[in-house]
Image: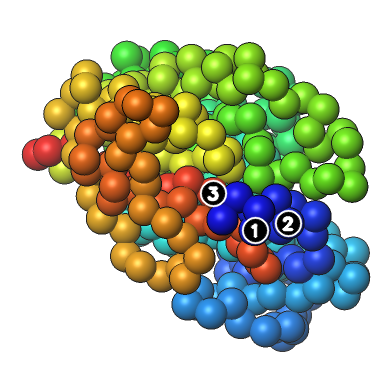
Amino acid sequence: MTVDILNELEHDEVLSYWINPLVDGKSEVEFDPVGEPVSGQSGLYRVTRSSGLTQTEAATTGRIYIQNASSFLAVKVLDPQPDEEILDLAAAPGGKTIAIAAAMTNTGRLAAVEPVKQRFFRLKANLERCGVTNVQLYQRDGRGVGRAVPDRFDRVLLDAPCSSESHMRWNDPSSYRHWSLRKVKECQRKQKGLIRSAYQALKPGGVLVYCTCSFAPEENEAVVDYLLKRSSARVTAIPAVVNDWLAGLTEWQGRKFHPSIGESRRILPRDVWDGFYLCRIEKPA
C-alpha cells in the first residue's frame, strides 16, 4: 500500500472542477461541462491538466471552480443547508468556502476565518470573484473563536493547516523541502487548538468536519482522539462514496485511539483524488 501511495506522488496529470452557480447573472460566460463526470460525485468533472482549462475565461471569472475531488467531498460530508449559520475555521484560499456558499445558495450566514494577512486578502478576492455574498470574513487566530462565540454554529468545517504530505511531488523538490518530523509536531499542536475551538463554537446537535491533506496519524486520528478525550464529541459514519479509501486507524505505534475513530476515512491518492483524511463529528444535543 505504501509503495502505491509513493508511486501516485509521481503523477499530477488530472484536474477536477465544478460549475459555480453563484456567478449566474454576473458573468456572460457560458460553460458546458467538458471532460468526464467523476464517479460518485454529482456535479464534479475531470479533465487532463494539459487541457488548458485553468486558462479559460470560465475559470478566471469564477464560472467554474477547479478543486480537487477530496476537497469537494469534504463539503459534501459537511452537507451545508440554506439559511444555516456555518463556520469555515481555516478558510484560505477559499475553495471549500465557495462550495459551502453554493450549497447554501448564498443564504444564511457563513463565517470564514483566516489569520495570515496575505492569505486573508487572497481569500477575500477569491470569494468576491466567485459571487459569494453571504460571508463575513475574520482575520484572526481560529484557536480563539470557540471561546468568543460558543455553541453558535450549525456546522463547522476545519480543514486544518497541516504538513501537506499529499501535495508532495517527487519531481518538484519545493513541494517537500518544508517537511520534517518537527513540522508534523508543530502542525499537531496547532490542530489540537483549532479542533477544540471548532467544537466549542458548534451548537449542540451540530456537525463538525475535520480534515487534512496529511498522511500522518499524528495530524489526523491522534488529533480527533485528543478532542474525544476532552469533550462529549462523537465520531459518526461517513457514507461510502469513494472506492479508494480506508477506515481511520484505531491504533498507531502502540498507542490506541478511541474505537469510533475507525468511522473516519483516509482517501488514497489516485486519479482525481489527493490523499486526504476526513472525520465527521457531532456534538450531542
**Splitting the image into 4 quarters, where does residue 172 fall?**
top right
Q: What amino acid type is highlighted by mark number 3? A: Phe
Q: Position of residue 66 (x, y in %)?
A: 71, 61
Residue 7's tag is 2
Mark 2 and mark 3 lie on one chain; the one further toward the N terminus is 2
- C-alpha gap between disc 1 and disc 3: 15 Å
Mark 1 and mark 3 lie on one chain; the one further toward the N terminus is 1
Q: Position of residue 62 (x, y in %)?
A: 73, 61
Q: Secondary structure at mark 1?
A: helix
Q: Nearer the viewer, mark 1 or mark 3?
A: 1
Left or right: where 223 falls relative to 140: left
Q: Are marks 1 and 2 in contact (CB under 8 Å)?
A: yes
Query: Is residue 223 positioned above or below 140 on the image?
Result: below
Q: Position of residue 240 (x, y in %)?
A: 35, 68
Is the residue marked by circle 2 packed among few (<14), some (14-19), or many (20+) residues within 10 Å?
some
Q: Which residue was labeled with disc 1?
A: 4
